[in-house]
Image (spheres, rainbow, N blue to C red):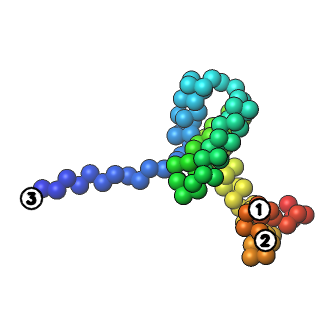
């Protein structure tokens, strides 16, 4: 018996995929910042998340729109990825209050004055 062993490579988001999506978005929705339109769409997606926060696709819509907004600033796909990693590192280096002492329905922000 012969087995078909075409193993699929895991998908990933890389700079070239972000650049391709940006070209598609510009062609589909128009060029330029479109800030208010992107924000309006994100607000609608947040309403859907609020209705059922367990639906991953609704969170993904927010992420896709955030990528679109970031790319519309003129940043390349690689610049966006680099900025994400830099921000993660910056946040990991910050001081954060004990989440157990704070309301669960409010944002937890870093302790100010640490960058």
- Of the numbered discs 1 and 3, the one sitting upstream in the chain is 3
Do callouts 1 and 3 mark residues in contact (Cβ within 8 Å)?
A: no
Marks 2/1 in contact by CB < 8 Å: the verdict is yes
Q: Position of residue 56 (x, y in %)?
A: 52, 53
Q: CA distance from mark 1 to mark 3?
A: 59 Å
| Mark found first going from the N terminus, 3 or 2 | 3
Q: Nearer the viewer, residue 45 or 70?
A: 45
Foreground: disc 3 or disc 2: 2
Residue highlighted by disc 1? 106
Q: Which residue is mark 2?
A: 102
Q: Which quadrant holds the C terminus?
A: bottom right
Quick check: 38 left or right of 23? right
Which structural element holds mark 2? loop
- On the image, the x and y values in percent for residue 48 come to 60, 47
- Residue 28 as seen in the image, left or right of residue 69: left
Q: Residue at x 38, y 52 (%)?
A: 9
């Amino acid at each position: 018996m012969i087995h078909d062993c075409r193993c699929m490579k895991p998908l990933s988001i890389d700079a070239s995929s972000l650049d391709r999506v940006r070209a598609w978005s510009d062609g589909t929705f128009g060029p330029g910042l479109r800030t208010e339109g992107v924000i309006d769409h994100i607000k609608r997606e947040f309403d859907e998340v609020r209705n059922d926060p367990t639906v991953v696709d609704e969170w993904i819509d927010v992420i896709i729109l955030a990528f679109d907004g970031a790319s519309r600033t003129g940043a390349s796909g690689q610049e966006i990825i680099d900025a994400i990693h830099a921000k993660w590192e910056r946040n990991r280096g910050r001081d954060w209050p004990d989440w157990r002492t704070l309301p669960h329905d409010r944002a937890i922000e870093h302790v100010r004055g640490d960058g």
